[in-house]
Image (cartoon, helix red, strand yellow):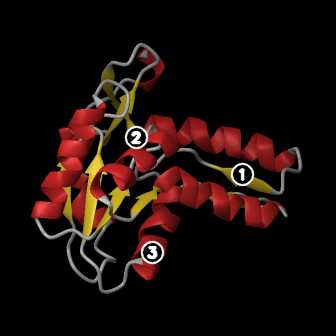
Amino acid sequence: MAEYGASPGDELLLTLLSDHQLAHVSRQKVERSLQSIVEVLDNQGFDVILLMSTASITRLTARNSILLEPIRIIPPLVASIVEGHQVGVIVPVAELLKAQTQKWQVLQTPPVYAVANPVEGSEQQLIDAGKYLLEQGADVLMLDCLGFHQRHRDLLQKSLDVPVLLSNVLIARLASELLA
């Protein structure tokens, strides 16, 4: 944790630690380390490098590999899929709500938001978050955290009879197409 601790003036990035605790780390330090990893993978000849984070990390580059960054791909992809619909976005923790407005500005209609934690939350909390979004006018739900899995999507679709998009499935399908 010490090597990623924020220095004065650093932008903060919220991250989930392996012990399931949330911590603020330096975005600049994380991006610098990720860039080093991308360069190693790029030099090793990987065709596609997939960043598995929906955080706003956008300053990474690869010379030869295709670098898939969910923050650049998911919002415009979702916008093209849901055009004309009201999106309800479920995020894992309230601290992420502040950054959502900028992230989802590509949507025709500003989305509505709710919080449900895929790691520590219950199925009922997820269903309640989905119900809240439907009450706010959402007719499509977006699970915007790589911690959400197919079982979360299936639970919402079965319980609420509403289309549910899952960020990790969207990015994984794109990656699989590039590798086919």
Q: Is residue 20 left or right of residue 68?
A: left
Q: Residue 40: image x %, image y %?
A: 78, 40
- Residue wearing tag 2: 27
Q: Is residue 44 left or right of residue 135?
A: right
The picture quadrant where one finds residue 87 is bottom left
Q: Residue 159: image x %, image y %?
A: 31, 49
For badge 2, the amino acid type reads: Arg
- Residue wearing tag 3: 76
- Residue wearing tag 1: 49
Q: Earlier in the sequence, mark 2 or mark 1?
A: 2
Q: Nearer the viewer, residue 124 or 91?
A: 124
Give the CA distance from mark 1 to mark 3: 19 Å
> Tags 2 and 1 in contact by the CB under 8 Å rule?
no
Q: Earlier in the sequence, mark 1 or mark 3?
A: 1
Q: Nearer the viewer, residue 65 or 22?
A: 22
Helix, strand or loop at label 3? It is helix
User: Going by the picture, which residue comes out furthest to the right?
Assistant: 45
Give the CA distance from mark 2 to mark 1: 20 Å
The picture quadrant where one finds residue 137 is bottom left
Q: Residue 1: image x %, image y %?
A: 43, 17
The picture quadrant where one finds residue 124 is top left
Q: Is residue 153 left or right of residue 44?
A: left
Helix, strand or loop at label 2? It is helix
For badge 3, the amino acid type reads: Pro
Q: Residue 8: image x %, image y %?
A: 26, 32
Q: Nearer the viewer, residue 47 or 39?
A: 47
| Residue 124 sits above or below residue 19 on the image | below
Which mark, by number, is residue 177?
none
For badge 1, the amino acid type reads: Ile
